[in-house]
Each structure stands twice: as C-alpha cells, then as structure tokens.
Image: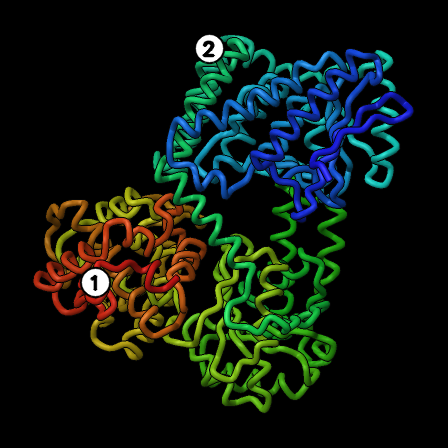
Amino acid sequence: MLNPSFEVDADKIGWITFDDPDRSLNVLTEPVMRRFGEAVDAARAAGREGRIGVVVIRSGKPDSFIAGADIDAIAGITDRADAETKIRLGQAIFNDVASLPIPSVAAIHGVCVGGGLELALACRYRVLSDSKKTGLQFPEVMLGILPAWGGTTRLPRLIGLQASLDMLLTGRRTDAAKARRMGLATEVVPDTLLAAKVRDFAIAVSRGHAPLPPKRGLSARVLESTPPGRKLVLSVARKKVLSSTGGHYPAPLRILDLLAAHAAGSVEASLAAEVSAAADLVVSPVCKNLVHVYYLREGAKKLPGVAADVTPKTVKSIGVLGAGVMGGGIAHLAADNGIRVYMKDIRHEAVTGGLQHARRTFDKLVERRRLSKREATQRMELIGGGLDFRGLASADVVVEAVVERMDVKRAVLRDTEAHVAADCVLATNTSSLSVDEMASALARPGRFCGMHFFNPVDRMPLVEVVRGASSTDIAVATVHALALRMGKVPVVVRDGPGFVVNRILGPYLNEAGYLLGDGASIERIDAAAKLFGMPMGPLRLIDEVGIDVSRHAGASLHAALGERLAPSPVLLALGNTKRLGRKGGAGFYLYEKGEEKGIDETVYADLASVVPPRREIPEQQIVNRLVLAMVNEAARVLEERIVTSASAVDLAMIMGTGFPPFRGGLLRWADSIGPKAVNYDLEELRQAHGDRFAPAPLVTELADTDGRFYRAFP
C-alpha cells in the first residue's frame, strides 16, 4: 500500500491519506516525503483536469495526524551540505502544496507536530477536531534545531509575530481551542463529526465559500506592523531567551535572528534563511546532544531487567501515607491523571493541609489556563482523605510519604500492609533510607519497592523506581507504569545510599562548601556552575532543598560511604546556625515571601571561623572541582551496579537535577573530554585537595584502556 495514498471521490474531493503500515504514528521519512510529493503532483493534475475542486490531507491513524520528521534521520546528519539538500527537498514539496491552484485542507485530529504542522501551514485551511488529543506543536527547538520546511516562515505570517514566538521558542503545545483563537485553526469541529464536517467544509470551499481569515488583536497588529514594533517584540524575546538559557542553546537565537531579518520580507528569502540556519544547527554538537537526550527519554518508557511477559497491575486508585507537601503533591499528580486517591495521616489538620495543597496546585493550573474550573473541580473530587485505613482497602498502589525516619517508616508500612489487599503494591518515597531495611518489616516484601519523587512533585520530571533485593518484577513494573501514566520519567535503580541523584549530587554540594572554605565567594561559585549550564548554583540549591535537609542527607551519605563524603567544615558550621534556606527566609541568600533577593552578606560573619577572606579562584577550577566530583561518584554508582547503564545515570541527572541537556548528560560530557583527561584532572585535584578526589577504579580503568562510559555500560 502506498503511503500516503491519493484518491478521488464522487464529490470531486481529492484525498491524500497518510497511514504508515509499519508505525503507530505517521512520520515524515524521506521515502514518505517523496511519495507525498507524487501525491501532490497527482492532485495538481486532477485539479487541472477538473476531476477535483479541493484536496484534503488527512491521517488514517485513529489518534494522530503526523508526528513530524524522522528523528533517526536528524541524528544521522553530520554533513552540512547533506543537511541543506534534505531541507530543500522538504521545502520544495511543501511549496508545491502551498502553490496548488485548488484549495487545500488539512484535517487534523490528534498529534500534529514539527513537519506535520509545517505541512498543515502549507495548506490553505486547517480543520481541527476538538478532542483533547489534538495538539499543535513545534518541538524542534528542544532538539536544537528550528522548523525549516517553511514553519519559521509561514507561522508568523499567519498568526503574527508574538503568538509565533510562543510556539517557536518554547515548543509548547497548543490545543484546538487556542489554535482557533490564534487563527492557526480555520475551524474547530466536534471530534465525533470530524469526517462529515471536513467533507462539508471541503465542498464549501471548492464552491468558493471560503471562510474569512481571522483578525488579530488591534494591539498586536499595531505593534507588529512597523519595524520599531517588531524590533521591540524581538528584543524582549531575546532578553527572555538569554535569561532562561544563558545563551547555551543556539536554536532560539537563530530563530530570533531569522525573524528579525525576514518576518516582513519575501517568503523566498525567509525560506532560504531557514535552510542556512537549520543546516548549521542540525550538524552542531548541541543538536546531537539534545537528540541523545530525546532518545534517553524515549528509552525510559522501556523497563530494564524485567521479563517481557510481566504485565503491570492496572492502577485505578492509590493511597498516600502522609499528607504533607510531598503527599499532597503526589495526590494532586495522581488525580490530575484520572487516578482516585486516598490520603491517610494521623492528624485531621494534616489531611486538610494535603487537600489544600492539591487544591492550590489545581488553582494554579486554572490561572495558567491549563485547566478549566470545571476540570479542576472534577479532578479534585478524585482526592479524599482521613485518619483510618478503610480508604486504602481498594488501593492498587500505596505510596508512603511520611517523615524521613526509618523507625517511623517501618512501623507505618507494617501497619498498612495489614489493611490493604494482598496484591496491593507498597512503595516508599524515601530519598535516602534503605528500601531493603524497610522491606524487612513486611510480610510480603516482594510487593514493595521505592518510588522516589522529587520536590516540587508537579514540576520535577524524575521518579527513581528503586528495586529492592526482594522486589518482584510485578511490583517494579507496576510502579514504573504508574510513573509513566503520571507523566513522569522513571529510572529504575538498585537500593543504595542516596540511590543515583542524591548520591551524585552529594559530592557536588559538598565541594561547594569546600570551595567556600578555600576563599571562593558565594557569587563566584554559583555563577561558575550556571555558566557551565546548571539551572542554579550549588549554594543556591542547598537553600532550595533546605539547609537542615541537606545536612541530614550529607550525614547519611558520610555514614554510608566513608570519609570521601565527609561534610565540609563550612556546611557543618552552616548547619549549626539558625539558617534554613528559602523556607526560613535566609541561607546563603535572602528571601522575601519565598522570592530570592540576593546574597546575604552576613552569612560570611556567621561562618567566619571556617571561611577565610575571599580570594579569586579561576572559574574553570571551580567547574572542575564541582563537576568532576559528580563524574567520579557516577563512576562508583556504575561500579556498584546501582544502575547498569551510563544512559540511566545521565537521564536521572538531567531530569532530577537539571544537568544541562545541551551537554547530553554528565557521563556523555565526560566521554566528550575523555576519561584520560578526567583521570588526569582528578589526580591533580587529589594532590591539591585530598583523597576525596581519588579517581574511582572505573575512571582509571577507562583511562588506561582509552575506553568510554557509554561503551563500557551501554
């Protein structure tokens, strides 16, 4: 069967239908694009001969239109000339669509992203279903590239500069209702009537009954109609991009450059600029690293180490033990994904607080127009709570999120096990305590594992699924599937101190304390980390986590891993002050109503006994000490088989700490400079600063064999 196919019906409508027989989604591979070009030529000929008066482009898939270009092809392009050739091919085919002498209609239901949206923009009209599954998106910027088959050119000419920037620079999804308001959708029709409504629309436009083009708002028209207005819009956008990315991501800046030069010029010049910019970007290291991260995320949907015939337990309802901020966050997340929740605590006030936390999170989504008030109310109704165990009787999974004390967790889990179904999966949200030690308190340890969310639950994408020594495949598979259903990125790890993220982050935060003790300033330490690409500096992160929480975590790692994790004297002294970080209004920084207001210079006086007068430490030395401390600990994590692949380490660090995606991950970065260089630098740091920098045996082994982390742990 040809994909796409072309046929003509009795109403003189030409139908081009994408339906890849080998994939669940339609993807624009080069053979598919060439076949699409042939179908467009056939439609042109049929129109010229009077056999059709309109052409409709649609999908044969039940829940998607077109999922964009082939990511594998993007990953494989390393030659700039080859990139230009492939981009021009796509542009030429979509230009043929745009130049058809008969009306063209894109009938869109479900996923419509990247090249699929560019195809739709090349059509004269776009009819969308009102399904929640329907969404338009340009995710190219998240892969380090830009929409180069006409998307960067046609979108602003259709919906205006400001609305286009929101889609092009963020990769944000646009639903059907918003697309209609923006003028991106010509019409939005009921999902169940899409086929009939598209036919009616096609017949109408073929007879000359064309709908009026949408009118943009007056302020947008006035602002964007003059060079000074466009310059102002683009200047504001550029400042925002630089503030959020630190200039590490070239794609959004190239998009802004292209629009500055060509948004008001000819389409031909703009398309040519797209080719040049996209060809530069697609062969860049940033693009290759971001595509690598895309593959990491896709890989997280698969479950390593579990038999293929294991089916996860279907989860209709969950229980949450502990109704604090974490418990309320987990409850909100579950309800937001259609799962009924019961929060149990030992105090009415705590249950009320947990419900209020979930309610506030839903209210924020309403304020941001991510949910309607009705949808928020319906989801909030899925959450209940109380002091007894009866609400847990029907739970398929129960997540424990009580105070981080082993004796309390063991007692709570043991009591809970007696009140839930025999096949209920119990999970602990612990961030630092042993899953195996908790399991020893249970009669059915096989139905128990870790499910470590990161705070704030609604924003942090990672969940560490902790497989204990007794955890069965069904328990791990169920929690892994539940994390995916909740929209999270699960990484399966083995039980061990700090698991993956907190263990690797521990030396990084600790080294920031040692740097302070060597005379580096708070400002310089955090600035160096941010210039490397971290979302915030390590000292600012300690404030965010909480100084008391950080001290407890550091003490736990020290007890478990020995002297290389001995807390720095500065952080020990900080823990003896009354500073709590952001939640207390003061740490390394000052906070007002939770907002950071700058460095608290008085912290130097509080730490005068362990912090010497400030001195200049080169930025690269700061970066080396911070980042190589993480690489070294990551090597030990692999040695101990806490995880079995370098990619699992990198995915966990990107999703759990914000390690810069443009670098591809911690160990991909280490591989890029080479383990020989890593080993050499660690030895130099060891000589200068002590045995905490002693290279892990794996680092030395890779250096001696000219190996790589990704080759040794694929």
- Mark 1 falls on what kind of element? helix
* Three-letter residue code for mark 2: Pro
Residue that badge 1 annotates: 705
Q: Residue at x 70, y 77 (%)?
A: 392
Residue that badge 2 annotates: 228
Q: Residue at x 71, y 40 (%)?
A: 19
Q: Residue at x 56, y 55 (%)?
A: 458
Point out residue 84 in the picture as x, y percentages from the top left corner: 44, 25
On screen, 114 above or below 229? below
- Mark 2 falls on what kind of element? helix
Task: Depth check: give the residue in front, 686 or 93.
Answer: 93
Point out residue 189 in the picture as x, y percentages from the top left corner: 82, 33
On the question of residue 574 being in view, the answer is no
Point out residue 699 in the picture as x, y percentages from the top left corner: 23, 64
Identity of the residue furthest to the left in this view: 687
* Three-letter residue code for mark 1: Thr
Q: Quadrant of the N terminus?
A: top right
3D distance between C-alphas at marks 1 and 2: 59 Å
Horizontally, residue 639 falls left or right of residue 225, namely left
On screen, 662 above or below 516? above
Horizontally, residue 567 falls left or right of residue 393, namely left
Task: Depth check: give the residue in front, 311 or 407.
Answer: 311
Q: Residues within 10 Å of mark 2 (few under 14, many from 20)?
A: few
Q: Residues within 10 Å of mark 1 (few under 14, many from 20)?
A: few
Count of numbered circles in the view: 2
Whether residues under marks 1 and 2 lie with C-beta atoms below 8 angstroms apart, the answer is: no
